[in-house]
């Protein structure tokens, strides 16, 4: 992923792309779950307008689509907001390792 809003993937699985989207969209605080059923690896180039702080817009990326529109237009994928079970890892306690 580059700061200009382009992402190039080589031999990328849908599960990894879902993970990457979840990391990229962290401000939304919802996970991205792969429900495509696609099992192969894919090459792609995705061009989208990066999210920037107010007042820091880049004129070079102003006309690029949002990541949501780019996914649909360029890769034929769409994100849907849904409710459902999500796995979370809860750590109750951490102990220092014992000396050997």
Image (cartoon, rainbow, N blue to C red):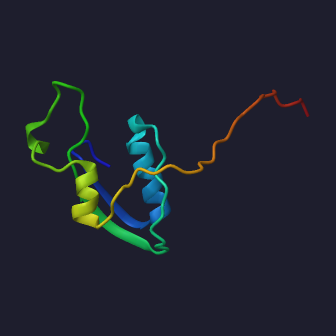
Query: Looking at the image, which is closer to me, 49 or 76?
Result: 76
Residue occupying the point 59% across, 48% down: 86
Taking the image as shown, residue 65 lies to the left or right of residue 67, namely left
Question: Which residue occupies the extreme right position in the image?
Answer: 100
Taking the image as shown, residue 76 lies to the left or right of residue 56, namely right
Q: Vertically, is 88 above or below 17?
A: above
Query: Looking at the image, which is closer to me, 60 or 55?
Result: 55
Residue occupying the point 67% across, 41% down: 89
Residue 25, picture quadrant: top left
Taking the image as shown, residue 30 lies to the left or right of residue 71, namely right
Residue occupying the point 72% across, 33% down: 91
Image coordinates for residue 59, horizontal then vertical, percent: 8, 38
Residue occupying the point 9% across, 47% down: 63
Image coordinates for residue 30, horizontal then vertical, percent: 46, 42
Q: How many marks?
A: 0
Image coordinates for residue 40, horizontal then vertical, percent: 46, 75
Image coordinates for residue 100, horizontal then vertical, percent: 91, 34
Question: Which residue occupies the extreme front position in the image?
Answer: 83
């Amino acid at each position: 992923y580059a700061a200009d809003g382009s992402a190039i993937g080589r031999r990328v699985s849908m599960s990894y792309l879902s993970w990457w989207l979840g990391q990229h969209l962290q401000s939304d605080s919802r996970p991205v779950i792969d429900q495509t059923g696609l099992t192969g690896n894919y090459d792609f180039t995705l061009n989208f307008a990066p999210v920037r702080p107010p007042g820091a817009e880049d004129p070079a990326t102003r006309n690029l689509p949002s990541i949501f529109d780019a996914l649909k237009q360029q890769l034929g994928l769409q994100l849907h907001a849904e409710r459902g079970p999500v796995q979370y890892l809860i750590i109750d306690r951490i102990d220092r390792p014992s000396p050997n």
